[in-house]
Image (cartoon, rainbow, N blue to C red):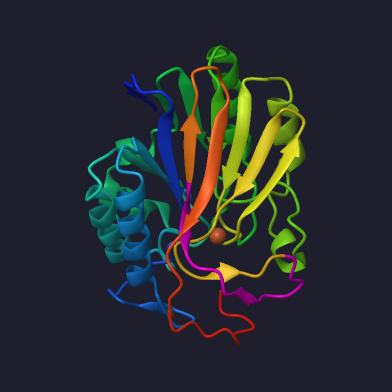
Amino acid sequence: MLKTLESHNEPIKLVQITDCHLEEQFGGDLLGMDTDFSLRQVLDLLKQERSDNQLVLATGDISNRGAVAAYQRFKQAVSDLSIPYLWVKGNHDILANMESVVGSDETLHKIVHIGRWQIILLNSTIDGEVGGHLPDNELTFLANTLSQYSDRPTLIFMHHHLVPIGSKWLDQQLVDNAQLFFQIIDQHDTVKGVICGHVHQEFNQQRNHVALYSSPSTCIQFKPKSDKFCLDKKMPGYRWFELNLNGTFNTGVVRVPEQDFNVDFNATKGY
Ligand SMILES: [Fe+2]
């Protein structure tokens, strides 16, 4: 459950990649975009720009339909970075297939201690549902972990978003019991940030002492503030974090260079 990583560096450097939507076949596409190719572009950029990165967190929808072959290719691609990585499940993923590839003890690491920081990973999915929900056992785990390690500045990662981002169709898929989550973290000023995927766009909002973030997908991007499904012309990317010894952190998004990914921008559904 707990993975401990030594870190004598300051700041500690992490990267989030999310929503890769790999298909069973290599080179499969999502609305025209080859999602293996776009992931490769993002990982190449990551290697180039953040060679001293210490940990990768993949926040779900790694595959588009849960295919074992998709997880195998993802594992291979991320292993090339030669640093530890952890996955959480998204609504498109199939946990048993993820575990069959990565090994259950790796996917089951839900707490990482790195230097004096703590990372907590939560599963916000319910099988068969697109929208988010935090089951009682995840909430209990969160409350217990925050109480047990009350001296560690903490970032929490999960797939779904917890607050509206101003896009009607995506805001119907919010974690539907987010208020229970906030009741817990409101009691712990060690929680510094909560980070999600799912919405395929960059977003941030401050809530009391906690910064909330979402991040670009490694494939297609959704148009911010759109009431209906609509693709954005922004490029795929990743989010980086630098965690300071004093409990503060910096973060930012980096996107691959402008290029034509052959995306069907007229698509009105298909996700
Ligand atoms: Fe998702």
- Residue 7 higher or lower than 137, as above or below: above
Q: Quadrant of ligand 1?
A: bottom right
Give the camera-side residue of 50 and 77: 50
The picture places residue 156, in percent across and down from the top left corner, at: 56, 35
Q: Residue at the location (62% across, 20% down)? A: 190
Locate the C terminus by quadrant: bottom right
Question: Can you tell which quarter of the image residue 115 is in?
Answer: top left
Give the camera-side residue of 120 and 80: 80
Q: Residue at the location (42% across, 57% down)? A: 94
Horizontal side, residue 160 vs residue 87: left or right? right
Give the camera-side residue of 10 and 166: 10
The picture places residue 32, in percent across and down from the top left corner, at: 45, 83
The picture places residue 143, in percent across and down from the top left corner, at: 62, 23
The answer to whether residue 85 shows anywhere in this view is yes
Q: Main secondary structure of the magenta part?
A: loop
Q: Residue at the location (69% across, 63% down)? A: 170
Query: Would residue 90 be counted in the magenta stretch?
Result: no
- Residue 109 higher or lower than 269, as above or below: above
Q: Residue at the location (65% across, 76% down)? A: 230
- Residue 32 higher or lower than 4, as above or below: below
The answer to whether residue 100 shows anywhere in this view is no
Horizontal side, residue 145 vs residue 262: left or right? right
Question: Can you tell which quarter of the image residue 262 is in?
Answer: bottom left
Residues in magenta, as a range: 225-239
